[in-house]
Image (cartoon, helix red, strand yellow):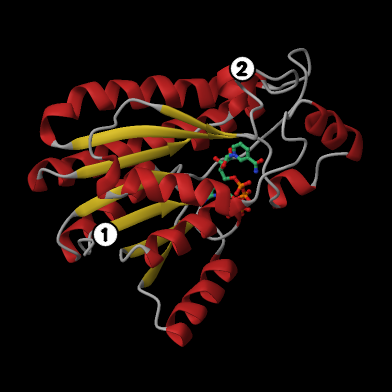
């Protein structure tokens, strides 16, 4: 039987994050969905209560480092420690190098990278006390192979991989693992807004010639969160239909 450890998923209100929340709950975890969107979380909370799902919600802007740290500490104290952290929340502000503004660069780094660091720092404090932890960061194939028009995003996602490997090395002896899942092109609201031409181009670069589903990513995260992956750390698993191989 899977231990009922607390799992926290940033950006858990929709898309890949929501699928991860559902998969971890199904795995027997108590899951906290953190998101900036109140309405989405209210809907999820209502569904959880109706269906008896062990899901809690926290409305928070994860770029507020103090609020995020305090929230993580409060959750850990209230639920016997944090067992699993999924750094999922992320944004894009695409553009060619010559058009990306400082603001668009900084925003992407603040959400995709710095908030993941702050959440990881808070989580590891709790995980060290309990000598168990699973940290899973959602990177991207853009961070692995690059993508024209995503220099800010790819920089943040490649940095997440570097950070995750440092965390893996720092905490390896304490039964805390850190791994990344790097999605390829997944059908979500984030990708729905891309022009058809960009979607066709993306599909042509995927050996399987199709986009992935949010569940494809959630399944990989559930594996890294499970006891089956206890001897795996510092890895990057591309879930991308073969795009980055
Ligand atoms: P999504 O549909 O946009 O969901 C992201 C969630 O995070 C949204 O609910 C968003 O709220 C929330 N969020 C954004 N900024 C936040 C903040 N400051 N504080 C708290 N929550 C915040 O994205 P997705 O497509 O599911 O992607 C999830 C992750 O996978 C991201 O890290 C993304 O980079 C990565 N990824 C996705 C793909 C893909 O093809 N979809 C491919 C590679 C990697 P708002 O909507 O209000 O901003």
Which residue in the rendered view is the most extreme toward the right? 197
Q: Is residue 33 above or below residue 182?
A: below
Residue pointed to by mark 2: 145
Q: Which numbered marker is on residue 49?
A: none
| Number of marks drawn | 2
Q: Is residue 38 left or right of residue 73?
A: right
Instruction: State the residue at coordinates (47%, 55%).
Output: 20
Where residue 228 sits, quadrant-wise, is top left
Q: Which numbered marker is on residue 6?
A: 1
Is ligand 1 within 8 Å of the beta carbon of the residue shown at mark 2? no
Image marks 1 and 2: residues in contact by CB distance under 8 Å: no
Q: Position of residue 99 (x, y in %)?
A: 78, 18
For label 1, the SS is strand
Where residue 204 sits, quadrant-wise, is top right
Instruction: State the residue at coordinates (52%, 74%).
Output: 42
Which of the two discs, 1 and 2, sits closer to the camera?
Answer: 2
| 27 or 83: nearer the viewer | 27
Mark 2 neighbour density, 10 Å: few (under 14) some (14–19) many (20 or more): few
Q: Earlier in the sequence, mark 1 or mark 2?
A: 1
Quadrant where the N terminus is found in the figure: bottom left
Q: Is residue 183 left or right of residue 49?
A: right
Q: Position of residue 41 (x, y in %)?
A: 52, 68
In 3D space, how far apart are the residues under numbered discs 1 and 2 (Cα atoms)? 33 Å
For label 2, the SS is helix
Q: Position of residue 210 (x, y in %)?
A: 75, 41
Instruction: State the residue at coordinates (72%, 21%).
Output: 100
Instruction: State the residue at coordinates (37%, 41%).
Output: 65
Mark 1 neighbour density, 10 Å: few (under 14) some (14–19) many (20 or more): many
Q: Is residue 156 above or below residue 133?
A: above
Which residue in the rendered view is the most extreme toward the bottom? 50
């Amino acid at each position: 039987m899977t231990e009922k450890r607390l799992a926290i998923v940033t950006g858990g209100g929709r898309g890949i994050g929501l699928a991860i929340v559902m998969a971890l709950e199904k795995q027997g975890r108590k899951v906290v969905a953190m998101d900036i969107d109140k309405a989405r979380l209210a809907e999820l909370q209502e569904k959880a209560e109706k269906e008896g799902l062990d899901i809690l919600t926290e409305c928070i802007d994860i770029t507020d480092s103090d609020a995020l740290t305090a929230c993580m500490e409060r959750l850990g104290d209230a639920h016997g420690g944090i067992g699993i952290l999924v750094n999922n929340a992320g944004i894009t502000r695409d553009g060619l190098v010559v058009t990306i503004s400082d603001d668009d660069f900084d925003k992407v780094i603040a959400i995709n990278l710095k908030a993941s660091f702050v959440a990881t720092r808070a989580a590891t404090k709790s995980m060290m006390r309990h000598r168990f932890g699973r940290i899973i960061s959602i990177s991207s194939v853009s961070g692995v192979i690059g993508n024209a028009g995503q220099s800010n995003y790819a920089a943040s996602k490649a940095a997440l991989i570097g950070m995750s490997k440092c965390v893996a090395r720092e905490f390896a002896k304490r039964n805390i693992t850190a791994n990344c899942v790097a999605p390829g092109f997944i059908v979500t609201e984030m990708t729905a807004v891309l022009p058809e031409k960009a979607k066709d181009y993306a599909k042509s670069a995927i050996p399987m010639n199709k986009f992935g589903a949010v569940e494809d990513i959630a399944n990989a995260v559930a594996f890294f969160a499970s006891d089956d992956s206890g001897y795996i750390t510092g890895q990057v698993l591309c879930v991308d239909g073969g795009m980055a191989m």
